[in-house]
Amino acid sequence: AHARGIPTRVYPTMGEPLGRHTGYKATVVRVITQRPCFSFFVTLVMALFLGGVGFALGAMQIDTEGWETRGTEIADRAMTIKTWKYGKFTLSEGVPLAFGRDEDSRRRRLLSLDDEDVNNEVSQRLASEVSHEPGHRGRALLDSHYTPKPCADPYIPACDDNCTDEARQDADQFGRWNGGDLVVIFSDSADLLAKESLKEMCHAEDRVMAMSGYSDKCIMSAVTCTGNPPSDPGLAAVHDGDRRCLPPKSIVRFLMAKYDVRTCDEFTTKSGLDASIEATRTKLATCADAFRADQNITADCVANGFNPAYINAGFGPSPKDRLTATMTEFKLLSGDSIDWMVEKEKGGDIESALSSSAFSAAYNSRDDELKGRIVDEALNSDMLMATGAILIVLVLIWVHTGSALLTLGGMLQVLLAFPSAVFFTTMVLRITFFPFLNFIGLFVLIGVGADDCFVFYDKWTSAKAKLPPGATATEVGANAYWEATWAMFLTSTTTASAFLASTLTPIAPIRVFSVFMATMIIFDYLYNITVFAACVAFQHELMRNGSCSLFCLDFFAWYSRRKAASIDAKYDQEGAAKPESDGGSAPERFCREKMYPPLHTARWVLIVVLLALGGVAVHQASKLTTPTDNDVLLLGEDHPMEQYGIIKKKGFMNSKDAVLWVSVNWGLTPYDEPVYNHLNPKKYPNLKLDTSFDASSSEAQEWLVKFCDDTSVLKNEGKEVHCPFKEFKSWVTEQSGRYTNRANNVPYDNNGPDLDTYATECDTSGFPVPAAKFDRCMAFYARYQVDRGWISTDKSLLRNLYQPAGTSGDDDVKLFFLRMEFASNISWTEPVDVLRADFDAWESYITDALATAPAGLRSGFHSGEAWHWMDTIEQMEAGAYGAAGITVLVSGFIIFLGTGNLAITLYSLVVIACILGSVVACVVGMGWTLGFLEGICFTILIGLSVDFVIHIGVAYHEVAEEFNRDGAEATRTDCTREAVAQLGFPIISAAFTTLISAIILFFAQITFFNKFGLIVMLSMVIAVLTTFLLYVPILDALGPQGHQGDVWHWIAKCRKKA
């Protein structure tokens, strides 16, 4: 440097003062600026170590589940029942009879809990909770003989009492429920029984069967056929010699078989078919009305193809006899058929085959696995977009800094924060649940990290411009490092606090995401003031010493120097004096000279107009409502697989998915272990027995039967009821009658348990059972049901009884749980306010009823999955508003901490409220409601909306302080102009960087990512516009001057007087 004519500097020792800084502040600046490589590599090694430990030992479980509340009263009830229902429990008091009697069984059960799959709800739901699936219902042809037929004949498996084993096998395969079936719902037609619609549905079914690979995955008919294959391409494709795939189960194939329709086109050409179809329509309408009155289906209705699973809910006699929805099931083999369906869905083959102008087609596999697989693949694909966002941000950081070194340093800062946050959450906080949302945090972090890089770089550049040429990194750092660090500390603290405020929402994915985001923000800040700061200092010294190409380190400085050299040569040639620069970087001069003046001129107009718009926006935002249903449509409302779920839920006559089941329970105390269970959806609480429960007394038994009858009449007349205790009463009464008849030598039904054994276990007095034998009799009844094959062990009353520890006899068995279920009068797809009203009505009814119950039954409670969903939505809404309120308060505190000025704090809060209100008003105008996906987006919105305001407010205060240190008093104009000059460009750059990275998400397949991108885009645009068009004019017109609003000055003044 000396040889190049650059002044050298003698660095003070670590303990000496450095400018205004002394002590640790001076030491930190010297370490960062004088030993940048040491600072960089020490931090890098530490971050990599933390990340490695977190990923290797943190037991992180990536998941997309857990979208329900934990820890609320309603959630505790729901989780208690789920724990019992899924068998995810042991009892300290003994061993449930369904799990075995001895302690070894209990220990085996305890060890197996972590390995059980509780997500396969279809296999674990109780019988009363399984939706009624479409069945064969004896749908048979009038001609049911099974001699071989020509292969071209329409064919539906049928069977009667005299059919062959081969034919019976066919009928069983055709009628059985298979999770791998491809199910299609045709809808949105004026009438699907019209001949044109039937023809088009037939062709659509044929096109599906004609897809390559279908014949390898279908269930083949065991019944042989003769002659030529069918002429229709679909049926021909699935014909294999003298065998063929089982045909689809559909109204189309039924009509083809019943009326001998050989091809799809014959629906419109066959003579006399119109009258036959109309006769079938009339019969179906009559059967539909009869089914609503009495759900037993007559043989006549079966013979005419009536199946409530295939007929839309509103179907009936004229004028309601237009079929607007029906279902087709393609019978596929279990196993790898799902892989074939996924392949065809990804290739667009299924949607193409079902496409028609005559109707809309929705589809899924019977067990929903097709949709699950498509969602998982879409998630993985969309997450790769983060790579694209990283590349875009790399370019934008380079555009801002002009430096390849700083670009890589800035991105390294961001990327190191992710594994470090994994370490902190998994190893320190012991949170192993890792929702997919955490990966979305990368998009947010990229924007926040770029913002921090821009602030630090521009603070450094501004300080450098104010110092003499050749200033060392230590000299620049003394004027820039702590100012930048303080500014970023304030915004990082506010952003992290905003995310932490969202932990008010008691939903595990949101809580964990909020904690993880706050942690990433903190680590990003720490790596910015170490890793990125070291890169800035290192580059500064390289440029000062000229030891590296300026083109690589700072392209814009290289360009400016070349331009300056050209200008110098011009002035030297002309002999003219070169004008002096007023100092500051080019972006700073632009913001001061070009950007600020129009804002200053129009400040009063901008204040009035923007405040009025902000008020309107806040009012509009208050109209945000909760969703009217519980669908989380990750693939978008118009996607065929999402439409399938919407229609299937309540679109057919036997749809049960939307039934609101209310469970009334005795014997358990609602409970959920706090903290860690609430942060991990896979953790289930253990059961806590209600020690006051006792249903053995005669009064209790009679009361339970009366409660079931009364509730059936009062709360759900005409709806389904499941009262196992009434079934127990009927069984006891029947067996006692048998015993009495035998004793009196009266003929009796011998189809039942051994009467002597029954007398030993239950007594012979009938119902109510003597209290001393009540529990033992319940156990005998439960075992009898299992032995007869009426119900499986894990779904029987054996789950409700346990063998007390230290005992082995039947006399010691205890009933610990009792449950009744009632179908409520409303659907659980009703709006939340309707659900809340129904919940309150049930709560009041149950409370009043239990008040009259015998002592052992007064601690009962009601629960339901619909109530849990209702609670989730209500808590989401309360959490969003609560988090917004806390964020505003924390922002106010941070701004006050950074400025000590009440006026600046007040103005900032008003502007932040306008930003939040404006973004929410925009999405309300787009029809959004506060559902799961929107709640997450609002969580992110709150964290992104405050930084720019804080930057400008703190900069305004720092300018005033700088003037005071120089012995001058700054005007509002001075403070506002310099605040805009210093931070205008970093704010715009940060907003633009975040905006561009978010736009990538518009191309994602998952709806959440689209909404997330939109929220981020709106947040950035509105935050920047409101900051410069409202906040800056307010400070320019009404900002404090001198010591106006300065609380610290007032305190000091009071102390001085004292």
Image: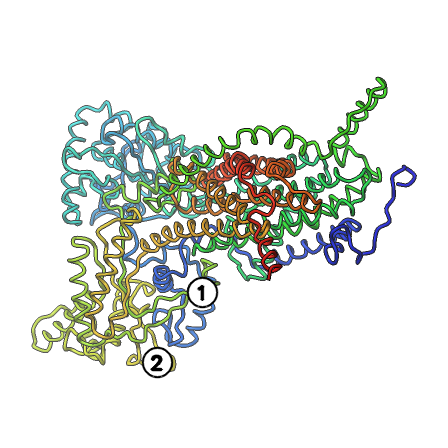
1045 to 239, vertically: above or below? below
Disc 1 or 2, which lies upstream in sequence? 1
Rendered image quadrant of residue 1050: bottom right
725 to 886, vertically: above or below? below
41 with respect to 323 (left or right): right
Q: Give the residue at the far front of this rendering.
A: 1057
Say which amino acid is labelled 2.
Ser
**Residue tagged by mark 2?**
808
761 to 585, vertically: above or below? below
Q: Secondary structure at mark 1?
A: loop
Few, some or many residues within 10 Å of mark 1 (<14, 14–19, 20+): few
Q: Secondary structure at mark 2?
A: loop
Q: Give the residue at the far right of this rendering.
A: 3
Say which amino acid is labelled 1.
Pro
58 with respect to 113 (left or right): right
- The location of residue 377, given as percent across then percent down, is 50, 42
**Residue tagged by mark 1?**
674
